[in-house]
Amino acid sequence: MNKTTFTEDLENNRLIAVRTFDVAVEKVWKAWSDPAILCQWWAPQPYTCQIDEMDFKEGGYWIYNMVGPEGDVHRGRMDYLKIEPHERLEAEDYFVDEDGNASTGIPPMQMSVKFDSNGSSTTVTSITTFASAEAFKQMAEMGMAEGWELACNQLEALLV
């Protein structure tokens, strides 16, 4: 199993995660764009993912819930800003309340995800930019990198 490499760019409030999957880019892209597959890996176990709505297109959005084993629910929304199939996507990701309103406790995060095809493998580079050093620290303390590694492990298991 491959591992994710993480780089903390503290000067620019960015977390850079790089992971190579030993499958073609079309399969990795589908795992990001098909809601039936996306929900199988997005929430790190023991959490599960439930999709309320998903419209995977530029200007579209995805509203999801990460549900914990004790029934705790963490709602999120991702607004798709730019989509270049099999190459990259850019989005704004943030926590929302049950009515879909943005959380005031954690500022939105900007995500840029690049898919580099190497023939039979694909390297995914995800850059998350935080609104401030404080927001970066808050997400780091919540275990963002550890959760991302678990989610990538789940994605890799689905792709083989």
Image (cartoon, rainbow, N blue to C red):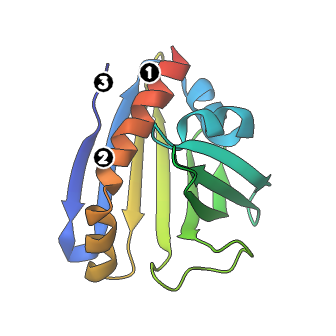
Q: Quadrant of residue 142?
A: bottom left
How far, Cα to Cα, is label 3 from label 2?
15 Å
Q: Residue placed at 38% from the left, 45% from the top? A: 148
Q: Which mark is in front, 1 or 3?
A: 3
- For badge 2, the amino acid type reads Glu
The tag earlier along the polypeptide, 1 or 3, is 3
In this view, the residue in front, 17 or 65, is 65
- For badge 1, the amino acid type reads Ser
Would residue 56 be seen by someone viewing this image from the given angle?
A: no
How far, Cα to Cα, is label 1 from label 3?
12 Å
Location of residue 29 in the rendering, given as x and y in whole percent from the top left corner: 61, 35
**Residue assigned mark 2:** 146
- Give residue 2's mark: 3
Q: Residue placed at 27% from the left, 63% from the top? A: 140
**Residue assigned mark 1:** 121
Secondary element type, mark 2: helix
